[in-house]
Image (spheres, rainbow, N blue to C red):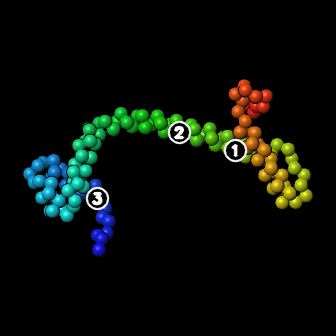
Amino acid sequence: MKRPRRNHSPAFKAKVALEALKGEKTVAQLAAHYDVHANQITSWKTQLLENAAGIFGAGAVESATDREQIRELHAKIGELTVERDFSYGPPVVKCRASNSRERDTIRFFWRMSNAASRLFIDDGSSSYSRVG
């Protein structure tokens, strides 16, 4: 019968990886002691070595670029929100439908035609172009 999948805490992974880095015991001995596969210990050890520089300040450089990227994404979200609100807002032409079903149908077709008009891109090769 298969063993259920185990999730090890980051503290446990760090402890095992540090012991592997010390070299006092072999990876096979550590695997037997902690009941973890030797390949997993080697993987944790590699991850520790690759990410150790981030502990001593490399994260500060990344956080500035992350902040800039977040700022750009917020601007894009605002731009898309304005575009969505403009294109799906109330119809420009007042509809004088007698009931709500007719009114909803008119609004649906107006929105569909508005969405279809955005599909045309003016690349100068045709006489059809999108206005606006």
Q: Residue at x 66, y 40 (%)?
A: 82
Nearer to the camera, 87 or 117: 117
Name the disc covering residue 73, or none. 2
- The answer for how far apart the CA atoms under marks 3 and 2 are is 32 Å
> Residue at label 3?
9
Judge the density around disc 2: few (<14), some (14-19), many (≥20) Cα neighbours within 10 Å. few
Residue type at numbered disc 2: Leu
Q: What element carries label 1?
A: helix
Q: Which residue is drawn at 54% across and 40% down?
A: 74
Name the disc covering residue 94, or none. none
Q: Is residue 14 visible?
A: no
Q: What element carries label 2?
A: helix
**Location of residue 6 by image quarter:** bottom left
Judge the density around disc 3: few (<14), some (14-19), many (≥20) Cα neighbours within 10 Å. few
Give x and y (percent) for residue 86: 72, 41
If the image is split into quadrants, where does the C terminus sit?
A: top right
- The answer for how far apart the CA atoms under marks 1 and 2 are is 18 Å
58 vs 45, left or right, is right
- The answer for how far apart the CA atoms under marks 3 and 1 are is 45 Å
**Location of residue 81 by image quarter:** top right
Residue type at numbered disc 1: Asp
Q: Which residue is drawn at 15% across and 54% down?
A: 27
Give x and y (percent) for residue 120: 73, 36
Of callouts 3 and 1, the N-terminal one: 3
> Residue at label 1?
85
Residue reaching furthest front? 125
Q: Pointer 1 and pointer 2: residues touching (CB < 8 Å)? A: no
